[in-house]
Image (cartoon, rainbow, N blue to C red):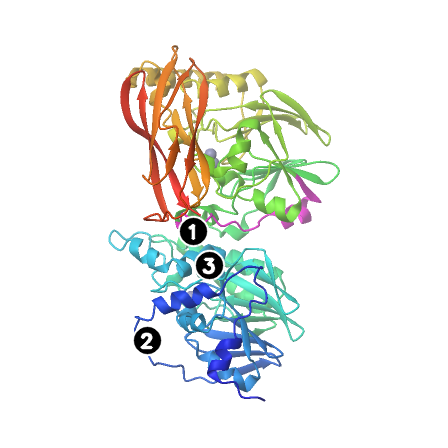
Amino acid sequence: MSKTSRRGFIKSAGVAAMAPAGVSLSQGTVSAAKKESQHRTSFTPNAELKKVSENLFYLEDTCNVYLIRDGNHGLLIDFGSGKILDYLPQLGITQVDWILHTHHHRDQCQGDYKAVERSIPIAVPAHEQHYFGDAENFWRNRRVFHLYYVRNDFNTLTENIPVAQVLHDYGTIRWSKRDIFVLPTPGHTLGSVTLIIEVDGKKVAFSGDLMHSPGKLVNLWDTQVNYGGFEGVDLGVFSLAQLREQKPALVCPSHGEPLPDPDTGIQQTIDRLTDYYRFQTGNAPSLSSRGYAVSPHLIAHHLTTSSFYAILSNSGKAMFIDYGSASGTHFFNFERATATTDRIRFVEHNISDLKSRFGMKAVDVAMPSHMHDDHMNGFPHLIKHYNTQVWCYENMVDIFENPRGHNLGCILGEPFRVSRSFQDKEHFKWEEYEFEVTHSPGHTEYQMALFVSIDGARVAFTGDALFSNPDSSESVLRHNLIFRNHVESDSHLKSIRNLIDHEPNLLAPGHGKPFLVNRGDLLMTEEKLKRQTRFFHEIIADPDVNFGLDPSWCSLYPYQMIIRAGESSSAEVRVQNYRIAPLKMEVALVAPREWHIEPEVLRFDVPSQQKVRREFKVQIPKDWRPAASRFAIAADVMCDGKYLGQITEAVVEVG
Ligand SMILES: [Zn+2]
Ligand SMILES: [Zn+2]
Ligand SMILES: [Zn+2]
């Protein structure tokens, strides 16, 4: 074995064997130079390297650091203090291609600066990348007083570490002629992943701290997200079941010993944690949520974060109405955890159950009842992994395809393609079913009601428009009101009138179980909603009340702009005139002075009850450097000669 000098190693390490073309590792070296002011300690683990199989080794460092060898190349799972680097020469490894992290805790990565100094690229879970690349910003913003969000993200690095690649859930990456599968396994942290790789002929799962050993976790505090919550236990049970389905031959945890034949050990952990979760909360874990047959061809899932439905055709194809998160735990924790650069995390659920219990063969089409993330954050997954087509009511298309355009409640940030869209009152056929789509505003302007006969029932899928009353003596349906979703004074009335006209006998709502309705209930609900409209008129000062209901009657599009120095861009002003007379608008942008904005003032009329769009051209100088990577610009507005001021804004990100 040739002795590799440290200098030689530094030179040879870090060829990005699985990096996409163009990933530059030089930036890591630059950052490292900037960080040399940090004190480093001389502590070192006193364990020795252990051999698991011919090419799989681990060192018990601040966490277990796993090393996979392929000839003179190595791949590391987590990094601890970085002590593992000292063992490479004796194993004949001259080049470490990657460090892959299972999660962001400091014990996994506190030595990463050493890897940066050696230009070893680091790949991290997509949902935790900001804890590495933007750790210092995390610390500028992490609330400590009024601490109710008790998630242990305090165990985050104290310095930024450059991220060469992110590990996307359900993605595969290639290293040395093998695929590494990224299984999302939230539990110990919300963004944790398990990495599944074949080593020495065995399917090995590097599971981070999902479990320590059969029936045991390394600690419980990391499983708590909210005050008094048991979220990580619930999520961990779900993730362990997904891991078990992968049938690994060896599970390699970050703390504890590698576990051969892990099936029983995983199940034991699931069982114990399920008991513990039931004891603490009185509830069944998310894992036990299952759909039920409302009728032979309509399967309802009401324990998922939002209800979702599978309409089954005789061919075995399914149409999903909505498909959100696996459970409330899977939605609300990620919703609160989502950094501005991040997305709510989705894990697959119920598909194998629909196949095995109800004979479903394919998810052919998915239709969103409305544009809210809790109802469709599984759609990108269905498109990518099940070849599903998304069909929707026409006014949702731009929100799904250009989510940055809008500032509305509950938008999913991940754009996806819509295959087909429908107009109000359009009829269409899918398999043996006849549908009618209608516009159903109120909960949001971007909502449909979908009517179809299934197994003899006249079903209406109504999203979040109306819910059954929990007080069963009251048959008036419940509604809700969220101004950021775009609501106008008669929106709810339009929806209820539409239902009365279609006379469904089963409402399938966006939350809760389907329930029977009759014309009397709907008429009483209409009376209640008329009362709401009267309230709007009584309370809002402007006689054209929609100016007091719609915060975006004057808006900038796109709401979230991505701008690059040296490029030109456009910013559109959109004005909805709710008056019976035309509006005279004068609009100017309040933006960085170095930008060239054309024209200086936009002057235009908006006819009564119309929406008008006008465009600013924005030119960003090549040498312009923003003060912050994310900031706001505003629109200063004169309307009919009255100075309203900066009534709307957009967020700018510098790409
Ligand atoms: Zn950890
Ligand atoms: Zn909603
Ligand atoms: Zn909802």
Q: Amino acid at mark 3?
A: Gly
Where does residue 286 sit, x and y in percent of width and height? 50, 50
- Left or right for 218, reference 214: left
Q: Could you tell me how far apart the alpha carbons at marks 1 and 2 are, in whole angstroms?
A: 47 Å
Q: Amino acid at mark 2?
A: Arg
Q: Residue at label 1?
A: 282
Where disc 3 sits, the SS reads loop
Where does residue 233 sit, x and y in percent of width and height? 45, 58
Ligand 1 - quadrant of the structure image:
bottom left
Residue shown at the point (30%, 51%) measured from the top left:
148
Q: Residue at label 3?
A: 187
Where disc 1 sits, the SS reads loop
In this orientation, does residue 267 appear?
no
- Left or right for 123, reference 136: right
Q: Could you tell me how far apart the alpha carbons at marks 2 and 3 are, in whole angstroms?
A: 31 Å
Q: Indicate the quadrant containing the N terminus: top left, top right, bottom left or bottom right.
A: bottom right
